Amino acid sequence: MSGKPKLHYINGRGRMESIRWLLAAAGVEFEECFLETKDDLTKLQKDGSLLFQQVPMVEIDGMKMVQSRAIGNYIAAKYNLYGKDLKERALIDMYVEAIIDLNELLMMYTFQPADKKQQHFANLVDKATNRYFPVFEKVLKDHEQDFLVGNQFSRADVQLLESLLMAEECKPDILAKFPLLQSFKARISNIPTIKKFLQPGSQRKPPLQEKDLPKIMKIFH
Amino acid sequence: MAGKPKLHYSNARGRMESIRWLLAAAGVEFEEQFIEKKEDLEKLRNDGYLLFQQVPMVEIDGMKMVQTRAIASYIAGKYNLYGKDLKERAWIDMYVEGTKDLMDMIMYLPFQPADTKGKNLALIIERATTRYFPVYEKVLKDHGQDYLVGNKLSWADINLLEAILMVEECKPDILSAFPLLQAFKGRTSNIPTIKKFLQPGSQRKPPMDEKTVAIVKKIYGI
């Protein structure tokens, strides 16, 4: 049935956050059903609601969609955030896949054992500032447009902003050498739907804290 | 420029194999430039060919495409293997992501510590037979059609066949409880472009052997 999309996940960022960002950016209201215990997950599995027994799962347009990339692709296309043709989509996909790689590094930081944290942090900063950010800085420099692809707001812009903010949470001055990314950040943050999502009280989730880890591990393991 | 797509990767399956399958299934001839030592990778990087310093990279339609999924999506879209509308694409994406998760487990196997191999292999078999294959068996059973989505060959079918064959290399009788997948395998393998790809001498790559594992580890510093 039509109605608001319904998100099934833990009350945390994880693999659902990018989907929350996309829906919010598109101005789509959504509901959330949080997994609090292992039983909540088991129930969904037993119901046959999870195609591969995993979350994220999003009820949308009569489907119970799983696999975060599949969900992201569907939402982006449905709400015209996926470029105007195959080649623009190709560029958006390339950028988004790289951002997902970076986000994995950022998200995994909290899960590192104490003795691995420093090395992980160093790797994270190195990849962000030497591999990923320079690419997007250059893209913006080369075409001088407000958005990454096709002079039009797209999923790539949404996901990049999400990533920039997460990176700053790890290291507040991480954008010091990237003036165009700084102005990109300000500009995209000011888009009304995104501005709203960035305000307290929105469905945006806070960073994972170490104290939340045991509860999450219990649900999934 | 038009011309054959050119694939840059090691002479191995890895992350490029699914792209080879797609191109082959679509009947698209392609060239390959193999990375055989670290210097080959460094050269690509220094030449500015790799957007994020990584392979796979595919030169296609004037682009130097990187990121496996981006490349595969483009090829699927271009050669009409991505369904007829948004919802069919959604199902194709879901199915492909599922088989990819399974194939990734197999891909990582040679690179894991020797003492975990047995456990990891057991997990692959378990996942294949309890999490993934039952889904596809049911899809085929429910609609009674030859293909997974929209009664037409798509990326999902090609990816599933690739996954089935890979898991069979781990355990030859893995499809014993899945009669519809067995029929699917037979049928899809007989599609002319795919049949050709499955023959000796094609650009399909063999499973990793120890020698290739060593080369790959050296190139990528893993």
Image: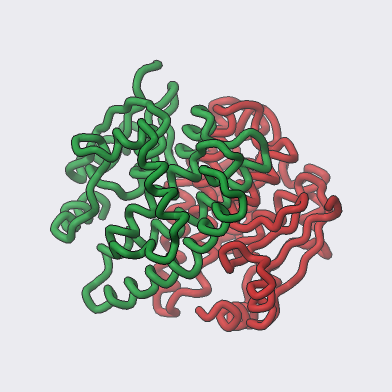
Q: Nearer the viewer, residue B74 or B216?
A: B74
A1 in relation to A169, above or below: above
Tally the numbered discs.
Answer: 0
Furthest residue in direction left, as rendered: A211
The answer to whether residue B29 is left or right of residue B131 is right
Location of residue B122 (image quadrant): bottom left
Residue B177 appears in the figure: no
Residue B52 appears in the figure: yes
Q: Nearer the viewer, residue A140 or A46?
A: A140
Colour green, chain: A
**What hue does chain B carry in this figure?**
red
Give the image location of residue A111, x and y in percent: 26, 64
Q: Residue at x 32, y 33 (%)?
A: A7
A56 in relation to B103, above or below: above
Give the image location of residue A47, x and y in percent: 31, 31
A141 in relation to A202, above or below: below
Give the image location of residue A76, x and y in percent: 50, 35
Q: Residue at x 13, y 58 (%)?
A: A211
